[in-house]
């Protein structure tokens, strides 16, 4: 089982759309895939038309009175299941903090029994830097970081890379990719081109800012499913192929 | 294709119910939005073939094996009778069906069925073509919460069956497939489906439904004698019924012998012939004398023409077991013998096939059936006496007394021929017990049969070892004559002959104890009870 997580400290940078589309593409490849919507806003659950509700809430899951298995819902797509969001996830930091001796490893432990059932797990993280995000970074094999092409966001990536490098033992592979790229903006063009070639761990495939991606909230489905031939779907497909490989050194 | 873990229904189109798929969709529409899902997993056309041995070994073990055809090759799926999957393996290069399980590439299905089916081949029993369409059942959010699977199945028999047609269309099969996390929605959909007129829960698997539609039923072949006879039936009628049942077995196996599908077709055919000969000898007095006399000769001929191939089959089937016993010689030393046996079998098989395709065999089966049907169907006072029960008691009692007399006379100094003769008498007794099995008390019958089997096994081991030992000598002579016998092979054959002599000596040593159990006071009492209960007028 390989765990992918979409993470950024900022909101509105394309984490959920990336998680939803890449999870769909993984399932379409025939891999048994689970997407865990960890964001209490429940955007990924909404996109799959699944109610953002878990019986017993985040507490039951973290304390183990309910297994992840009990809360999983099948999506409309083959091989793709979803663990829905729940509004109580907003308190997950507190729950994890009171968990046990290793509060930063709890999510990873909860996911372990899923290995027999799934080939790929995607974690869609809420925007924050918190115990939840630290848990996610420890659980993940690949950290997918959407970046808006600005100088500041590049700085954020540096900080994140440094943070992960400080982990003892197992560290996730960091794969950044440019998201919401506006081809009309010169700065966007320059940063995406330069960084992808100069820096390790930055995907060559950018995800453009397109109204087709925004349409996902109307269609309530991955763009890769309802418009598979669109430019947006093609970009996600290329990105998916790229992030399954090791980043260039 | 509908697979396990679903709520399955069948639409009863046969009884004039006003079933229609539109009604199903309309009923479901009261709670769900029903949307067709073209290209859904499992939709489209599927071809399946169910396989089993001629004597239904998988079915009798509670298993079903099907081959799901794909574009290239396919998938072999072994499941329990209730559809629970047991094992599956892809087969890309297994085009020859019927085939032996040992011809399959290594895999979990082969591992599970090899011992169970060997040495029988897997035959196609039923072929089915399914056209599957899938509908999504959506909730108010437009989320798929269950699926309705419609399966239209056309089934064909691989070979024309006597009863029923060769192609049949099954009533449409419907299933509600659960979406993970939405069990209550699937239950609700199943409840709606069950309320549609003409729709009922599927009580049979597709396989069993297909067999029924083709006029067959599972396990419809057995090599046993299960003629429908009763105690009060006129003896000639009962004997005719027995002999017709044996003739059926002979005829059912001819095709498998001629196509050389596996060795057991010939074996079953020969057993039926042997039983027929015994029945003519021991019960033929109730048949017209000239008829019994004529067919005694004819069935002897039929038995004789089948002997050489069966003897060679026995050698080849037991070949690996024989080589495993070698101590001094290497198994490779015996390979020239195996090649020799295979060549000889091919030659003998051509002779056998010619005989079974020839006019004499056809005349035997046709004339015998005609004569037996006449006896079976002719009613009248002359057929009234004796009854089947009287005949059974007289014949079985006489056969038992003969076995006891011959067995009692055997001492440690008796020649092998006396044991061979006793073996024949024991076999005759066994056949008589089996012929009249429906008339016996089943508990008493099983006790007697079990003791008799012990004696037969011992006598069989003794004689088979002796016969094989002589055959090894004959084969060595024949191989030398054909210059096909390297010295190492002859030495290994010598070792095999020595092993056989040892087995024979062991069997001889065990004989006295086993026979005493069968024919001693307790054994005699068991036979007396068996025949007494039977004559007390069981129906």
Image (cartoon, coloured by chain):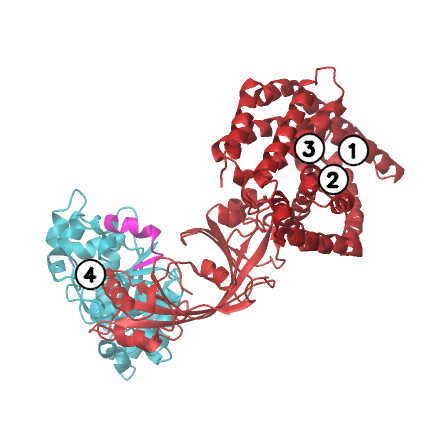
Do the residues at discs 3 and 4 belong to one chain?
no
**Disc 4 target residue:** A38
Is disc 2 surrounded by few (<14), some (14 to 19) or many (20+) residues within 10 Å?
some
Numbered disc 2: secondary structure: helix
- Residue located beneath label 3 in the image: B322
| 2 vs 4, front mark | 2
Q: What secondary structure prevails in the magenta region? A: helix
Which callout, 2 or 3, points at the residue further toward the start of the chain? 2
Q: Residue at x 29, y 71 (%)?
A: B196
The colour one sees for chain B in the rendered image is red
Q: Nearer the viewer, residue A45 or A92?
A: A45
Would residue A223 be seen by someone viewing this image from the given angle?
Answer: no
Label 4 crowd bin: few (<14), some (14–19), many (20+), radius 10 Å: many
Q: Which quarter of the rendered picture does the N terminus of chain A lie within?
A: bottom left
- Looking at the picture, does residue A219 appear above or below residue A29? below
A166 lies left or right of B429: left
Do tag 1 and tag 2 residues touch (Cβ < 8 Å)? Answer: yes
Specify the quadrant of the image occupied by residue B229.
Answer: top right
Find the distance from the CA under tag 2 to the CA under tag 4.
73 Å
> Label 2 is found on which chain of the structure?
B
- Local SS, label 4: loop
Q: Which corner quadrant of the image does residue B479 belong to?
A: top right
For residue B311, the mark is 2
The 10 Å Cα crowd at callout 3, few under 14, some 14 to 19, many 20 or more, is some
Cα separation, mark 4 vs mark 1, equals: 79 Å
Q: Chain of mark 1?
A: B
Q: Where does the magenta region start and end?
A: A109-121
Check disc 1 and report the residue beneath it: B471
* On screen, residue A146 above or below B393: below
Residue B483 lies in the magenta-colored region: no
As drawn, the residue found furthest toward the bottom would be: A184
Q: Quadrant of residue B17?
A: bottom left
């Amino acid at each position: 089982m390989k765990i992918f997580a979409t993470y950024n400290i900022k909101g509105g940078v394309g984490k959920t759309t990336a998680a939803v589309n890449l999870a769909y593409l993984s399932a379409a490849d025939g891999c048994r895939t689970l997407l865990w919507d960890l964001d209490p806003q429940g955007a990924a659950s909404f996109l799959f038309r699944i109610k953002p509700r878990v019986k017993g809430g985040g507490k039951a899951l973290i304390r183990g009175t309910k297994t992840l298995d009990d809360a999983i819902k099948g999506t409309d797509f083959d091989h793709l299941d979803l663990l829905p969001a729940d509004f109580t996830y907003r308190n997950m930091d507190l729950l994890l903090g009171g968990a046990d001796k290793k509060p930063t490893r709890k999510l990873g432990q909860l996911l372990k029994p899923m290995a027999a059932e799934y080939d790929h797990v995607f974690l869609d993280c809420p925007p924050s830097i918190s115990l939840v995000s630290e848990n996610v970074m420890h659980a993940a094999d690949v950290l997918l970081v959407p970046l808006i092409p600005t100088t500041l966001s590049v700085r954020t990536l540096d900080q994140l890379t440094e943070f992960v490098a400080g982990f003892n033992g197992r560290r996730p592979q960091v794969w950044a990719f440019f998201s919401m790229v506006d081809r009309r903006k010169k700065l966007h063009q320059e940063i995406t081109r330069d960084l992808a070639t100069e820096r390790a761990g930055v995907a060559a495939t950018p995800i453009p800012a397109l109204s087709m991606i925004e349409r996902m909230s109307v269609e309530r489905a991955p763009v890769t499913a309802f418009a598979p031939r669109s430019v947006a779907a093609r970009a996600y497909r290329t990105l998916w192929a790229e992030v399954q490989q090791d980043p260039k050194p | 294709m509908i697979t396990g873990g679903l709520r399955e229904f069948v639409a009863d189109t046969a009884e004039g119910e006003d079933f229609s798929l539109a009604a199903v969709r309309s009923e479901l529409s009261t709670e769900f939005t029903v949307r067709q899902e073209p290209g859904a997993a499992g939709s489209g056309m599927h071809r399946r073939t169910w396989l089993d041995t001629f004597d239904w070994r998988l079915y009798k073990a509670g298993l079903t094996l099907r081959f799901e055809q794909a574009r290239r090759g396919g998938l072999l799926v072994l499941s329990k009778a209730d559809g629970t999957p047991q094992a599956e393996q892809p087969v890309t290069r297994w085009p020859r069906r019927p085939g032996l399980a040992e011809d399959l590439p290594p895999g979990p299905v082969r591992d599970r069925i090899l011992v169970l089916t060997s040495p029988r081949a897997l035959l196609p029993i039923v072929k089915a073509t399914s056209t599957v369409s899938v509908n999504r059942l959506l909730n108010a959010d437009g989320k798929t919460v269950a699926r309705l699977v419609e399966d239209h199945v056309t089934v064909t028999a691989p070979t024309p069956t006597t009863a029923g047609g060769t192609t049949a269309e099954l009533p449409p099969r419907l299933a509600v497939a659960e979406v993970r996390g939405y069990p209550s929605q699937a239950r609700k959909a199943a409840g709606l489906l069950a309320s549609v007129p003409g729709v009922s829960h599927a009580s049979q698997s597709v396989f069993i439904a297909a067999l029924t539609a083709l006029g067959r039923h599972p396990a419809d072949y057995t090599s046993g004698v299960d003629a429908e006879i009763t105690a009060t039936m006129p003896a000639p009628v009962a004997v005719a019924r027995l002999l017709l049942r044996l003739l059926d077995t002979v005829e059912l196996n001819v095709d498998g012998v001629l196509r050389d599908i596996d060795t057991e077709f010939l074996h079953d055919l020969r057993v039926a012939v042997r039983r027929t000969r015994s029945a003519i000898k021991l019960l033929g007095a109730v048949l017209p004398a000239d008829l019994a006399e004529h067919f005694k000769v004819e069935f002897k001929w039929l038995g004789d023409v089948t002997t050489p191939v069966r003897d060679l089959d026995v050698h080849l089937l037991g070949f690996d077991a024989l080589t495993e016993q070698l101590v001094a010689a290497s198994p490779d030393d015996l390979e020239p013998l195996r090649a020799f046996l295979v060549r000889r079998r091919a030659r003998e098989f051509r002779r056998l096939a010619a005989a079974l395709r020839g006019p004499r065999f056809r005349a035997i089966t046709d004339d015998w059936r005609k004569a037996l049907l006449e006896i079976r169907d002719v009613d009248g006072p002359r057929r009234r006496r004796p009854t089947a029960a009287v005949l059974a008691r007289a014949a079985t009692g006489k056969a038992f007394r003969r076995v006891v007399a011959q067995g009692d006379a055997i001492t440690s100094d008796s020649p092998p021929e006396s044991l061979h003769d006793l073996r024949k008498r024991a076999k005759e007794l066994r056949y008589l017990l089996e012929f009249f099995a429906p008339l016996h008390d089943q508990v008493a019958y099983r006790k007697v049969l079990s003791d008799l089997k012990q004696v037969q096994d011992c006598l069989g081991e003794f004689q088979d070892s002796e016969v094989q030992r002589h055959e090894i000598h004959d084969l060595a002579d024949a191989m030398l004559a054909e210059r096909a016998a390297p010295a190492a092979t002859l030495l290994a054959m010598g070792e095999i002959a020595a092993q056989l002599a040892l087995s024979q000596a062991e069997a001889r040593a065990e004989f006295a104890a086993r026979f005493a159990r069968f024919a001693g006071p307790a054994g005699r009492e068991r036979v007396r009870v068996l025949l007494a209960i039977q004559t007390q007028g069981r129906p």
